[in-house]
Image (cartoon, coloured by chain):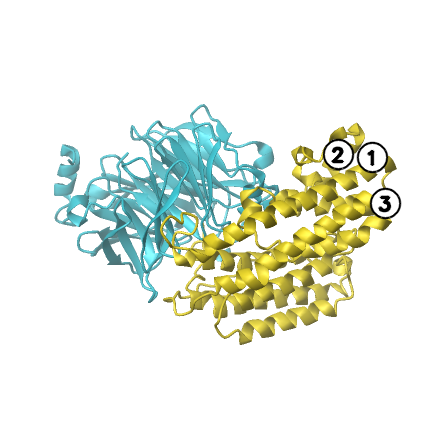
Chain colours: A cyan, B yellow
Amino acid sequence: MPSRRAFLAGLASASVTPTLGWSDVGNPIALSAAMTPEGQHVLVGLSVTGAITFQLPLPARGHAAAAHPHLAEAVAIARRPGTFAKVINCATGHVAQTLTAPFGHHFYGHGAFSADGALLFTTENEIATGQGRIGVWDRSAGYTRLDAFASAGIGPHEILRLPGGMLAVANGGIRTHPDTGRDKLNLDTMRPNLALFDTGGQLTDLAEGPAAEHLNSLRHISVGTNGTIACGFQWQGDPFEAPALVGLYKGNGTLIPAHINDLTLRQLDGYIGSVSAFGTHIAASAPRGGHMLTFDQSGAETGVHRAADVCGLCSTPQNSCLVTDGFGHVYTLSDADLTLRAKHPLAFDNHLVALTAA
Amino acid sequence: MRLALILPFCALPAFADVDRALDTHILPAQTELADTTQALADTAQADCTPQAVRPAFHIAYDAWISISHIQFGPLEDQALTLPMSFWPDPKDSTGKALARLTAARDPIVDDPDNFDDVSAAAQGFTALERMLYDPQPDADYACRLTQAIATGLARKSEAITHDWPAFADLMRSAGTDGNTRFQDEDEARRALYTALSTGLQFLHDQRLGRPLGTFDRPRPRRAEARRSERTLRHIQLQLAALETLATAMTDTDLTQTRTAFAEARQRAKTLDDPALQDVADPARRFKVEVLQQAVRAVQVAMINEIGTPLGISAGFNSLDGD
């Protein structure tokens, strides 16, 4: 049941984007970008059994999407260093609006709505300085640009709404410039962190890994119902010297490393693609190494599965984890088991976006 | 560098011949590993001096390199990948582990049932190479450690080989009721294809890429098995094994793949540099780079002629992550 405030917010913007609720589009529990065999980019809704509840064309390949907490509306954000984001009515497939990053900024590919759905937050690069910024957009005013605040680091990638409305930002630490594509300009000095903000954009905590592991770029984060934030890293050094690529944040400026067995760690190419805090466990996908990993709350490994090109992850209302790969498979993952649920003629893209509002 | 290819993925016209890959490649190569490591262990028991053990070491190491790209199955299930061979080893874990055992004269070397408790880095072919090619001040302990490693390699190889026929049956019955390991029929093919593509990538990025380093900073000391001058041999053996796997696992036209393999084979053959130490010589380094490019050509051909027809080549996420 939508809250009164969301209902009012929906009414307020109804003239711009007449939008139905998620139940009107088949009750998907997750959104994913995907590519059809013909090369068409699409946005799909997935049910808990891996069935497709809707499939809409996208104008170009996106990276991730931000899902509105109540209304069947998603914002698909360009891959970095893109400058557009498309507001999509998931009931009609209509691109209701195109957001453009302010002059001198580009998007990093992720975004998140506020709990009431009134504000959208996007991770951005202030190109001239390389400083990370969080763009604030007012949905109720037709997605006008309201504000921006410092992300407290360089290269903010995933942004997450926490239970209680706070925001968490994974600052990857890597400076890039659109003139040099994805070239990494500051590997010697990079210093990734996890930054926590209150709803007003005030920094409330900052967690960094050890200085000796400053090449461990934090990219993806996911929060569990108990507030623990799962962290997925991408190691910029020799993959055979990689430290823990998964971590847990439980407060107090501290990242707790998860334990990955040596053999598996050496096979991951130093790369975690997504993380998901689900039920009492944490999942991490390694698309380059072709592995799915699960951990308990202490960071101890509880499951290791080979799964080629696996990447998209999100928690389900049943406390399992939904998993997608580039071959069109949908799996569910428990603390120990990975079970195939469905196969579609699609290549699922990097990220699944949960529609279970935090 | 990763292959920056986004390829269309198609329906499944061809059937990878899982049976043929098992029967003509994996199972015989696995038996060869068990036989040659047993001969290695017997040799070391009879005479543990480096001169006596080296010939059997080379034969058994050849057998391992010819099957080590099959990383799934019993090898992985028994967690024996690293105990069989610990490379790459940028932190010199092998040197450190052997030095610790030797300094302590650890009696675990006389206890074959528990030798697998020592560091994985001290158990495999990479450790045995050190024993046979580095100076060993404590000859008595070195002898016992050599025997322990050789015996351990034989035991591990036997354990893996013993489990392969049952695992092969799971691959052959992919998608049938109760087969939770291979839940649909594509999974067995995908496992073979992953072994092929991962093997080629390892060849390109690690076996060739690590010693090559960059032009400004070549890393000859990072060459695999440089002490026994087996670096180039490993590349040739792996090329041969991967070609066998590639031709066994599909019935599609492999003209481009065969040509690319032949070119890489020829480049390796004319490389008169067994431990790839010439990577530091600007005038001779290019020959190794050309071989690496030839391996890249095999990767491209394999994607076009095997991966794409099988519908398992997309790499949608692994090739374009963020």
Which quarter of the image is occupied by the N terminus of chain A?
top left
Q: Which residue is drawn at 39% across and 65% down?
A: B9
Res A56 label: none
Q: What residue type is labelled 3?
A: Thr
Residue A300 is situated, as x and y percent measured from the top left of the image, at 49, 31
Q: Quadrant of residue B103?
A: top right
Q: In the rendered structure, are the residues bearing label 2 and label 3 in contact, judged by CB atoms less than 8 Å apart?
A: no
Q: Which of A28 and B63 is in front in this view?
A: B63
Please tell me whether mark 3 sits on a helix, a strand or a loop: loop
Left or right of residue B308, residue A139 in this image: left
Q: Which chain carries label 3?
A: B
Q: Do labels 1 and 2 share a chain?
A: yes
- Badge 3: few (under 14), some or many (20 or more) residues near its Cα, within 10 Å? some
The mark that comes first in sequence, 1 or 2, is 2
Residue for badge 3:
B49
Closest to the observer: A19 or B297?
B297
Q: Name the residue under label 1.
A: B141
For label 1, the SS is: helix
Please name the amino acid that badge 2 sits on: Val
Residue at x-position 71% and y-position 50%: B37
Rate crowding at label 1 as few (under 14), some (14 to 19) or many (20 or more) other CA atoms within 10 Å. Answer: some
The amino acid beneath tag 1 is: Tyr
> Cα distance, mark 2 to mark 3?
16 Å
What percent of the width, then of the height, locates residue B269? Answer: 73, 69
Do the numbered discs 1 and 2 sit on residues whose CB atoms are within 8 Å? yes
Q: Is residue B155 visible to the viewer in this orientation of the structure?
A: yes
Q: How far apart are marks 3 and 1 (CA)?
A: 11 Å
In-image side of B299 versus B140 (left or right): left
Q: Residue at x 59, y 75 (%)?
A: B259
* Residue B109's disc number: 2
Which residue is at the front of the view, B251 or A355?
B251
Distance Cα–Cα, label 1 vs label 2: 9 Å
